[in-house]
Image: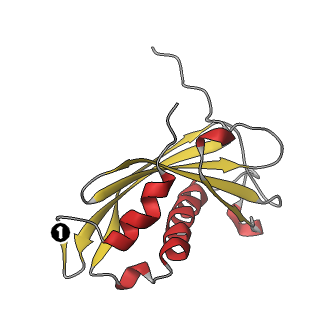
Amino acid sequence: MSERPPAPHRDEYVAWRTVTTRWRDDDAYGHLNNATYYELFDTAVNAHLYEATGLDVRRLPAIGVVAETSCRYFRELGFPRPIETGLVVDKVGRSSVVYRIGLFQGEGGHAAAEGRFVHVYVDDTHPDRPVTAMPEEIRAAVVPLLRPPG
């Protein structure tokens, strides 16, 4: 069995957002519910797209649909402390973007969790078909998030 990779460090992320945790985010055991992690990933990505483009990205002729998600958990998160989301792009393809989102709470430089989130851009009238090229507004918003070399 291979050794588990270490938790990513803050330095690996490019764009940041702080979100407030809510009482309902915790499960019966007092830690963040698994579904909430995915809500945070979705919010980090789409809030960045809205702010960087200045557009309602749902109204573009090609829309990003989630083709893949995953999460690696390193330590617990929970209410009432805020969570910082760090966002970086690993790859920009012709019609897709691969994001990583780190979740941080409290002191420390390592992520408590990291998500992988893949958007594939499809024609809004034919959502089963990827477009030949994602909208230029989206490309301009995600290229600056590409992981810095090293």
Mark 1: which secondary structure?
Answer: strand
Instruction: Find residue 24 and report its horizontal and vertical position in percent.
Output: 71, 68
Say which residue appears at 33% left-offset and 81% top-offset: 60
**Amino acid tagged 1:** Asp
Placement of 53 over or under 149, stated as above or below: below
Placement of 30 over or under 57, stated as above or below: above
Which residue is label 1 attached to?
128
On screen, residue 140 versus residue 32, left or right, reads left
Instruction: Find residue 54 and report its horizontal and vertical position in percent.
Output: 51, 81
Say which residue appears at 59% left-offset and 40% top-offset: 12
The furthest residue to the top = 1
Instruction: Find residue 140 and report its horizontal and vertical position in percent.
Output: 41, 65
Q: Nearer the viewer, residue 107 or 25?
A: 107
Q: Nearer the viewer, residue 90 or 111?
A: 90
Instruction: Find residue 63 and report its horizontal and vertical position in percent.
Output: 32, 74
Say which residue appears at 38% left-offset and 73% top-offset: 137
Question: Is residue 148 among the parts visible in the rendering?
Answer: yes
On the image, which quarter does residue 131 sit in? bottom left
Say which residue appears at 69% left-offset and 63% top-offset: 25
Q: How many badges with numbers are in the image?
A: 1
On screen, residue 123 versus residue 109, left or right, reads left
